Image (cartoon, grey):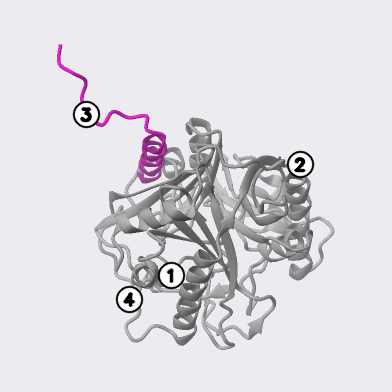
Amino acid sequence: MFSRIGLLLCLSLRLTAADLRAAAEIVDITPPAGTRMWGYTGRDQGGTGAADKLGARILYLEGENDAVAWVDLDLGRTFGRDAMDWVREQVQVSIPHVVFSATHTHSGPEVLESYGEARPEWEQRALQAIVAALLKARNNAQSVRLGFAYGRSEIGYNRRLVEGGRVTMLFDSRRDGRRASGPTDPTVAVLRLDRRDGTPLAVIVNATAHPVLLGRGNLRFSPDYPGPLRRAVERAWNPGPVCFFLQGATGDINPLWPSEATTEDEAVSQLGERLASEVLRVANTIQSRPAATGRVEVRQESVLLRSRWGPLDFAGEYRLLAPYVGHIASLLQVPVTAIVVDNAVALVTFPGEMFVEHQLDLRKRSPIRDTMVAGYADGYYGYFPTIEAAAAGGYGANDVMAATELGGGESLVNRALILLNSALGRFRREPPPAR
């Protein structure tokens, strides 16, 4: 087995100065009909089939000093910790860091933190296919250029209406979207990784809205609106890139129902295509450039948070919530990751449903102008409301789904800022000399 020093020597032999290498792969992880669905309590039926394939998109990125792989899943949450660690163990000789994130579709299969019996067959097959795709991507990595730009698309609304100290939840996208008045983040961030000839190898999209256009009554597996978004982007070039969708801080953000849509399927297509139109407009303005430093800095830490509620009886009143927060213990090691590419682009991950104000705060305070934020990464720990939202109340703010201690979201943002500044070398490693 190679040591980390051996891996770094291998990287240095493969790379020239200030070089970045990347590769992208797609794996089909669509489960069979009959698999239980995740996303809405009380929907006990198995899925009847797939309206659209579910995928795992693999991005491998290698710098002169380190390498990382990103696994972007069409699931409501990432796989459990044991499953993710199993994948990491299979590739650790070649890939020192593997980050998982989920698009948070509510039309995906049930995924649990752990299973009383064997892991479901569809999940084990998916994990094995992801391992193969990770190794293939690592072997096929090529030099890339990078470029970044921002756009804007109003795809979401804040589903919390706070009036006179009372919170009303606006869950119905068709009826409620235009009544909303709370904060949103219409930012569309686009990172292009181009081959040397300037054609895109990967397009990474970061936007923010719950994928819940397909409602509780839907029994077909689907990525929801990220599906048509990615399809449109991947078909816009020849050869086409792999399009990644990094779901942002959607804890209080629902999707806006397109005014022209009369069915859920139409809403999915139209919102996805509307977002794709802005992504393509932005992507086509990007003039990618060669790497300046060729460095990939990865910082990962766990923040110790207490459970807000202590032990709960998930066999009783909270039985329906067990697949979502039943695994949360009294003390939690909550992972945060910051990846800095070429000292110019940052990707930050949180493991749950951050309220959008956390994302806005992080972007504002980040030392790196071009910062992407992905929720639902490396696990699922419920909702992370702001302190003010928890005081006001409402779903995901002052109930069982807000499972970690008050101020937990603020703690995670602060830790991410520390990791970003650390990746830039902005902290002292030892105290100054005594005078």
Q: Pointer 1: what residue?
A: 79
Q: Earlier in the sequence, mark 3 or mark 1?
A: 1
Q: Earlier in the sequence, mark 1 or mark 4?
A: 1
Q: Say the numbered circle drawn on residue 430.
A: 3
The kind of residue tagged 4 is: Ala
Q: Element type at marker 1?
A: loop
Mark 3 or 1: in front is 3
**Residue at x 29% of width, y 50% of height:** 305
Q: Earlier in the sequence, mark 2 or mark 3?
A: 2
Residue 231 visible (yes or no): yes
The kind of residue tagged 2 is: Thr
**Residue at x 82% of width, y 66% of height:** 262
Foreground residue, 380 or 40? 380
Distance, label 3 to label 1, CA atoms, is 39 Å
Residue 418 among those drawn in magenta: yes
Q: Pointer 2: what residue?
A: 285
Q: Earlier in the sequence, mark 4 or mark 2?
A: 2
> Percent x, y for residue 2?
31, 64
Residue 344 among those drawn in magenta: no
Q: Pointer 4: what residue?
A: 315
The kind of residue tagged 3 is: Glu
Please count the marks in the image. 4
Residue 352 visible (yes or no): no
Specify start and end residues of the magenta stretch as a single range.
408-435
Distance, label 4 to label 3, CA atoms, is 51 Å
> Percent x, y for residue 270?
79, 60
Distance, label 1 to label 2, CA atoms, is 36 Å
Question: Which of the 4 quarters of the picture holds residue 33?
Answer: bottom right
Distance, label 1 to label 4, CA atoms, is 23 Å
Crowd tier of the residue under label 3, counting other residues whose Cα lies within 10 Å: few below 14, some 14–19, many 20 or above: few
